């Protein structure tokens, strides 16, 4: 459980960083640019990482 | 739509090294065992047949890009001819394929490292260190990857050559007969199913605007493909002279199996741990090229000015996908039965079809204007 919680920091940091990138893109490029794939990739990556960690340490 | 701010310009020498490492690295994976399943004694012909086919397709793609779309990557070609939404979808498909390739190859190398040198280390630690190194290389950009490729290329060539020559006392040339193995039809089928390792057509369509002199690309393609074919054929020949035909199809890590046999004398023996580090270094370069291509295609397809902030998400995605298969067997099955067998659709058919569609559209527009 402790390993799972500690390793969860990495996907959480990645999600935060990716969301910040999306917001920066929106600010910089406005409506010119597609931002939803940034959030999509971040969400898929976060979901899969958490699933793999859960399977390794909790299932 | 803004272009990706990648101002890298790579010379012909670096591009040759990059393309050679990208394809020849498969000699360390299950490629020799995969082609042996189809051709048995004639498995060495399969890299030659698929290499010739890949070279012809490479020359076609290069001619189309040079004549009609100079200074454009595949995504920019599609955007200019079929619109931004189609370009985004195409970029997503190519990137997904490259991410799957990265994850699958990373898992194979992780398993190789664990079974050979680090049996007590958790796979997550090996994978984590792998992806950190790959992520850092991709962060340095195309120029960084190209320079590291130039350094890794002689190591790779010398490593394969040494491995082949150091097992000379185990060679049984009569293992190579009958000449046609399972028959010419099986050889052709094996060549078609394993041709997807020649990712140079797709890579050409991605790096075209970054070549220092795009006119050199034809020479780059020819030299790198010939080098790759020689390396792959040489190792498969050596592998088949060392092991009996039926045995060659069953070994999960042919390179490691060959390296373990080395016994020239009391001093030159058990060299597999030396080779493992060589393979891992070459693998990092291959993974960096595929991950960079995926990140660059996504940025170009969706019009982002940079791809670097997305790297943590892509690295974690690759690591998570690589750990999804439950065991080694399912990881190898995913690579062989799905990515290798159907990879030609993305590696050859899609880029050529898209370039062809772009040329037709451009000609039609010119005719309408005239």
Image (spheres, rainbow, N blue to C red):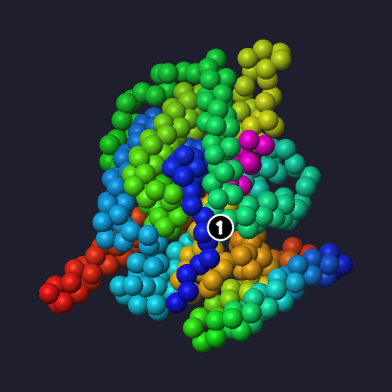
Does the segment drawn in magenta span residue B37?
A: no
Q: Residue at x 75, y 72 (%)?
A: A13
Tell me if residue B132 can be seen. Answer: yes
Residue reaching furthest to the right: A2
Q: Vertically, is A42 above or below B312?
A: below
Q: Say what secondary structure mark 1 lies in.
A: helix
Which residue matches tag 1? B291
Placement of B63 over or under B29, stated as above or below: below
Which of these two is toward me, B39 or B269? B269
Q: Which residue is depicted at the point 70% across and 44% down?
A: B114
Q: How many marks?
A: 1
- Residue extending farthest to the bottom is A31
Name the quadrant of the C terminus of chain B.
Answer: bottom left
Q: Position of residue B71 (x, y in %)?
A: 37, 60
Give the main secondary structure, helix, strand or loop, of the magenta stretch: helix
Measuring from the top left, give residue B334's x and y in whole percent.
52, 56
Packing grade of label 1 (10 A; few <14, some 14-19, many >=20) is many
The percent position of residue B234, horizontal first and vertical second, equals: 44, 28
Q: Which quadrant of the figure contains the N terminus of chain B?
A: bottom left
Which quarter of the figure has residue B189? top left
The range drawn in magenta is B277-287
Q: Position of residue B275 (x, y in %)?
A: 64, 32
Report the side of B350 relative to A19 (left or right).
left
Residue drawn at point x = 24 percent, y = 65 percent: B359
Q: Residue at x 33, y 59 (%)?
A: B70
Asked whether residue A40 is in view, the answer is: no
Label 1 chain ID: B
The front one of B258 and B246 is B258
Is residue B365 rendered to the left or right of residue B223? left
């Amino acid at each position: 459980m402790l390993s799972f919680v500690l390793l969860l920091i990495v996907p959480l940091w990645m999600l935060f960083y990716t969301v910040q990138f999306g917001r920066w893109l929106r600010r910089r490029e406005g409506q010119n640019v597609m931002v939803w794939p940034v959030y999509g990739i971040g969400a898929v990556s976060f979901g899969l990482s958490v699933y793999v960690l859960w399977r390794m340490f909790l299932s | 739509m803004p272009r990706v701010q990648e101002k890298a310009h790579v010379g012909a020498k670096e591009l040759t090294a990059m393309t050679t490492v990208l394809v020849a690295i498969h000699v360390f994976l299950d490629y020799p065992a995969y082609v042996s399943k189809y051709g048995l004694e004639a498995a060495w012909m399969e890299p030659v047949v698929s290499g010739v086919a890949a070279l012809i397709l490479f020359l076609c793609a290069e001619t189309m890009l040079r004549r009609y779309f100079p200074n454009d990557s595949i995504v920019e070609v599609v955007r200019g001819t079929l619109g931004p939404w189609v370009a985004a979808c195409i970029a997503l498909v190519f990137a997904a394929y490259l991410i799957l390739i990265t994850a699958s190859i990373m898992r194979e190398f992780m398993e190789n490292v664990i079974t050979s040198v680090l049996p007590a280390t958790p796979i997550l630690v090996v994978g984590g260190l792998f992806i950190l190194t790959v992520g850092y290389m991709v962060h340095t950009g195309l120029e960084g990857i190209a320079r590291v490729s130039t350094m890794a290329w002689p190591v790779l060539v010398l490593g394969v050559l040494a491995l082949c020559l150091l097992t000379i006392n185990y060679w049984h040339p009569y293992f190579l007969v009958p000449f046609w193995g399972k028959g010419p039809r099986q050889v052709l089928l094996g060549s078609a199913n394993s041709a997807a390792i020649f990712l140079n057509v797709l890579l050409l369509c991605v790096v075209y605007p970054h070549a220092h002199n795009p006119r050199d690309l034809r020479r780059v393609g020819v030299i790198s493909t010939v080098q790759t074919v020689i390396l792959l054929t040489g190792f498969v020949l050596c592998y088949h002279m060392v092991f009996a035909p039926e045995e060659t199809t069953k070994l999960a890590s042919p390179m490691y199996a060959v390296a373990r046999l080395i016994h020239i004398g009391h001093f030159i023996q058990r060299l597999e741990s030396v080779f493992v580090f060589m393979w891992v270094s070459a693998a990092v370069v291959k993974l960096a090229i595929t991950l960079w291509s995926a990140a660059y295609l996504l940025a170009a397809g969706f019009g982002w000015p940079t791809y670097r902030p997305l790297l943590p998400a892509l690295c974690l995605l690759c690591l998570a996908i690589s750990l999804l298969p439950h065991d080694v067997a399912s990881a190898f099955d995913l690579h062989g039965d799905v990515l290798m067998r159907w990879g030609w659709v993305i590696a050859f058919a899609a880029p050529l079809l898209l370039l062809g569609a772009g040329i037709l559209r451009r000609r039609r527009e010119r005719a309408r204007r005239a």
